[in-house]
Image (spheres, helix red, strand yellow):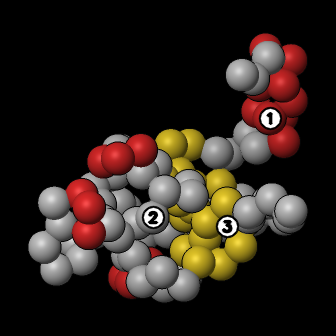
Amino acid sequence: METIKEFIESVKKHPDQRYLPHTPKKVPAGLIIVHNSVPARLQPDENNEGGAWREVGQGGFRIWRDRPSPNYVECKCGWAPHLGKHYRVKRAET
């Protein structure tokens, strides 16, 4: 669980970060679109027929806009091709 101090530090590092309620039509200048580690494509065990894409919020799938950061890497999952590039949270190295 994140402490208040950790939350404040996170906000300071990402002042332009905003969660989005739906997939945007375009990317604002100077920003990127990021999704969390939940797969953007529904999995076969989720009553999925044909590999449909998740809606924002479905199964914990979240997206946001932010400025580029070393915490984000380009994602090649195929979600939202109209955006051009989009990014995901960089996985922790094990």
Quarter in which the N terminus is drawn: top right
Q: Which residue is mark 3?
A: 30
Q: Which quarter of the rendering shows the C terminus?
A: bottom right
Q: Nearer the viewer, mark 3 or mark 1?
A: 1
Query: Going by the image, does 85 lie left or right of 10?
Result: left
- Measured in 3D between alpha carbons, the distance from the residue under mark 2 to the one under mark 3, in whole angstroms, is 25 Å
Residue 84 on image: x %, y %:
48, 85
Instruction: Tell me the SS state at disc 3.
Output: loop
| Earlier-in-chain disc, 3 versus 1 | 1
Q: Compare residues 43 and 77 and report the one nearer the observer.
A: 43
In this figure, which residue is indicated by the disc labeled 1?
10
Question: Mark 1 falls on what kind of element?
Answer: helix
Q: Secondary structure at mark 2?
A: loop
Q: CA distance from mark 1 to mark 2?
A: 24 Å
Q: Position of residue 49 (x, y in %)?
A: 13, 73
User: Which of the two marks, 2 or 3, is nearer to us in this view?
Assistant: 2
Q: Pointers 2 and 3 in contact (CB under 8 A)?
A: no
* Residue at the image point whose x is 55% and y is 74% from the top: 86
* Residue that label 2 marks: 39
Residue 28, image x, y percentages: 53, 64
Residue kind at label 2, given as amino acid type: Pro
Which image quadrant is residue 73 in? bottom right
Say which of 15 and 8 sits in front.
8
Q: Position of residue 19 (x, y in %)?
A: 50, 43
Quarter occupied by residue 8: top right
Question: How many numbered marks does the figure carry?
Answer: 3
Rounded to the nearest angstrom, the CA distance separating label 3 from label 1 is 19 Å
Residue drawn at point x = 32 percent, y = 67 percent = 43
